């Protein structure tokens, strides 16, 4: 997909992000040229900015960038709201300034604009995450892990959990964890609660136990066994070889399987009946 694009669309952008993210370093970009030969992107990392060379969104064949001001003529509110968006921080220099903004994800807009707008003349990333992978190359890997949200299969989109158009791209992320959980329970109603016997771990957010993009562990868990639970329920080792958790010796239990195996704490998200999180 990334190689099948027209020459007029190929451009290089240098983007400057305000913050340094470790994922950027991991996700070092390779730039595929017209011949699909990769050139290593130049990366300059300082404590204040990250310069990365990336590929512009594939765009409709033959379309050129027209700049965000042109979009405003018809998508006025979106352009206005975009000022608060995480991706509004992207900056490009010289000839490429038109490419950032809306067209960094939607591709060149000239054909769409000439047609007076309408569907089908502009890339809509809801249908494919490819445009996101151009800059977030590491995410393709995360969504290729054995247990993932079915984004590559087109059943869930990046936009279901991220807002590209306004505010924080991680929807109501940051400190508002309860609100971040809202994003998840919109689809996963069984975990919504309220539970008579709440598991306070959920106050830390679903992502304390689940890797939202993907994981090598079933159910996208951040850890496959009791390590997950013991990260908060630290064990007190007694001299006698007992493993005390919650005041009770668990030595014979932890060898039997996970903490949430049948008969133990299987109601990990909360229980209606049992304070020890059983059904
Ligand atoms: C002349 C008016 C006009 C301009 C200028 C315009 N658009 Fe649109 N755009 C529309 C209309 C009308 C639609 C169809 C809306 C609908 O059907 O809901 C649309 C739809 C879209 C869609 C959805 C396409 C799809 O197939 O799902 C995207 C994305 C989009 N515009 C982005 C942009 C961007 C980015 C720019 C600036 C480069 C832009 N538009 C400029 C009028 C315009
Ligand atoms: C970071 C990438 C990104 C940027 C930048 C971006 N968009 Fe989008 N846009 C998306 C995604 C993703 C979707 C699909 C949303 C979804 O999955 O619900 C979308 C969808 C749309 C749609 C179609 C809405 C619909 O209901 O189908 C329009 C119109 C649109 N964008 C316009 C714009 C305009 C105008 C700008 C600039 C102010 C812009 N976009 C900037 C990623 C982006
Ligand atoms: C042109 C390059 C580019 C494209 C295309 C792009 N992004 Fe980004 N994105 C960035 C950069 C750079 C940042 C870092 C901004 C910062 O950290 O200040 C970012 C930040 C983010 C963040 C927030 C990270 C955080 O920790 O707050 C999310 C989520 C995100 N992007 C999702 C997406 C999705 C989803 C798409 C596709 C619809 C997309 N991006 C397309 C360059 C891009
Ligand atoms: C099921 C929901 C969900 C989907 C789908 C999803 N994300 Fe995320 N993403 C999250 C959550 C939640 C976080 C915040 C993680 C945290 O706080 O630990 C996040 C964080 C991020 C970040 C910033 C932190 C990092 O890991 O670099 C980026 C960038 C990002 N996502 C990009 C994407 C892209 C690109 C896609 C689509 C290919 C996507 N996400 C699909 C839920 C999702
Ligand atoms: C747009 C709907 C949607 C959103 C939002 C969403 N998910 Fe999912 N989730 C799905 C779908 C679809 C599957 C795949 C179900 C399947 O394969 O049977 C899934 C699977 C999962 C699974 C694995 C379930 C299993 O049986 O293996 C977990 C865990 C999960 N999601 C957690 C989360 C978390 C945490 C969030 C919030 C960061 C979230 N989901 C947001 C739709 C969503
Ligand atoms: C304390 C850790 C923890 C937290 C926090 C957590 N989960 Fe889970 N979740 C688990 C474990 C463990 C499993 C596997 C249970 C099993 O296999 O029986 C699981 C399984 C799931 C499943 C698959 C359900 C099934 O029937 O197989 C979904 C969906 C899910 N979690 C969503 C969520 C959502 C949404 C949130 C936030 C509201 C959340 N989880 C918070 C530990 C957690
Ligand atoms: C993010 C931290 C965190 C994680 C991870 C976590 N818990 Fe908890 N858990 C808590 C807190 C906080 C409480 C309430 C205070 C307490 O009882 O220790 C609690 C309470 C419990 C209780 C109720 C104790 C009682 O008798 O009242 C059980 C059972 C439990 N957790 C099991 C688990 C299991 C099983 C896992 C792994 C799937 C797990 N926890 C993972 C934080 C966590």
Image (cartoon, grey):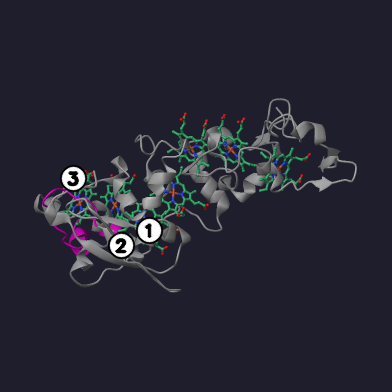
Relative image position of residue 147 (x, y in whole percent): 48, 36
Q: Earlier in the sequence, mark 3 or mark 2?
A: 3
Q: Is residue 72 magenta?
A: yes
Question: Is residue 163 in view from this perspective?
Answer: no
Q: Count the marks: how many?
A: 3
Q: Quadrant of the N terminus?
A: top left
**Image: 198 above or below 109:** above
**Image: 233 above or below 255:** below
Q: Which residue is mark 2?
A: 41
The answer to which image quadrant residue 82 occupies is: bottom left
- Classify residue 115 as left or right of residue 87: left
Q: Secondary structure at mark 3?
A: loop
- Give the extent of the magenta segment: 56-79
Please name which of the two marks, 3 or 2, marks the residue nearer to the observer: 2
Q: Earlier in the sequence, mark 1 or mark 2?
A: 1
- Seen at 26% across and 45% down, the residue is 124
Q: Secondary structure at mark 2?
A: loop
Q: Is residue 60 magenta?
A: yes
Q: CA distance from mark 3 to mark 1?
A: 22 Å
The answer to which image quadrant residue 84 occupies is: bottom left
- Seen at 31% across and 56% down, the residue is 30
Q: Residue 4, which numbered label?
A: 3
Mainly helix, strand or loop, the magenta region? loop
* Mark 1–mark 2 CB contact (< 8 Å): yes
* Mark 3–mark 1 CB contact (< 8 Å): no
Q: Which residue is mark 1?
A: 28
Q: Is mark 3 within 8 Å of ligand 3?
A: no
Relative image position of residue 26 (x, y in whole percent): 43, 57
Q: Quadrant of the C terminus?
A: top right
- Seen at 17% across and 69% down, the residue is 95
**Image: 108 above or below 195:** below
Disc 2 crowd, CA 10 A, few/some/many (<14, 14-19, 20+):
some
């Amino acid at each position: 997909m990334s190689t099948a694009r027209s020459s007029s669309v190929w451009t290089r952008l240098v983007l400057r992000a305000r913050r340094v993210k470790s994922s950027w370093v991991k996700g070092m970009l390779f730039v595929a040229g017209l011949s699909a030969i990769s050139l290593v992107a130049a990366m300059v990392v300082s404590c204040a900015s990250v310069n990365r060379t990336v590929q512009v969104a594939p765009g409709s064949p033959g379309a050129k960038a027209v700049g965000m001001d042109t979009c405003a003529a018809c998508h006025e509110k979106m352009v206005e709201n975009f000022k608060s968006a995480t991706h509004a921080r992207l900056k490009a220099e010289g000839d490429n300034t038109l490419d950032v903004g809306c067209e960094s994800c939607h591709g060149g807009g000239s054909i769409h604009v000439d047609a007076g707008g309408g569907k089908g003349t502009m890339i809509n990333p809801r249908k494919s995450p490819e445009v996101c992978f151009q800059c977030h190359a590491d995410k393709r890997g995360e969504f290729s892990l054995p247990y993932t949200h079915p984004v590559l299969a087109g059943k869930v989109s990046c936009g279901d959990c991220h807002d590209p158009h306004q505010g924080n791209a991680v929807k109501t992320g940051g400190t508002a964890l309860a609100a971040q959980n809202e994003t998840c329970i919109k689809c996963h109603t069984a975990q919504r609660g309220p539970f008579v016997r709440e598991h306070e771990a959920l106050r830390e957010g679903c992502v304390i136990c689940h890797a939202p993009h993907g994981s090598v562990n079933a159910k996208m868990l951040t850890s496959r066994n009791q390590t997950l639970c013991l990260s908060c329920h630290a064990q007190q080792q007694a001299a006698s070889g007992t493993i005390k958790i919650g005041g009770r010796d668990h030595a014979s239990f932890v060898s039997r399987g996970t903490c949430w195996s049948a008969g133990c704490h299987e109601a990990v998200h909360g229980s209606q009946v049992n304070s020890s999180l059983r059904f």
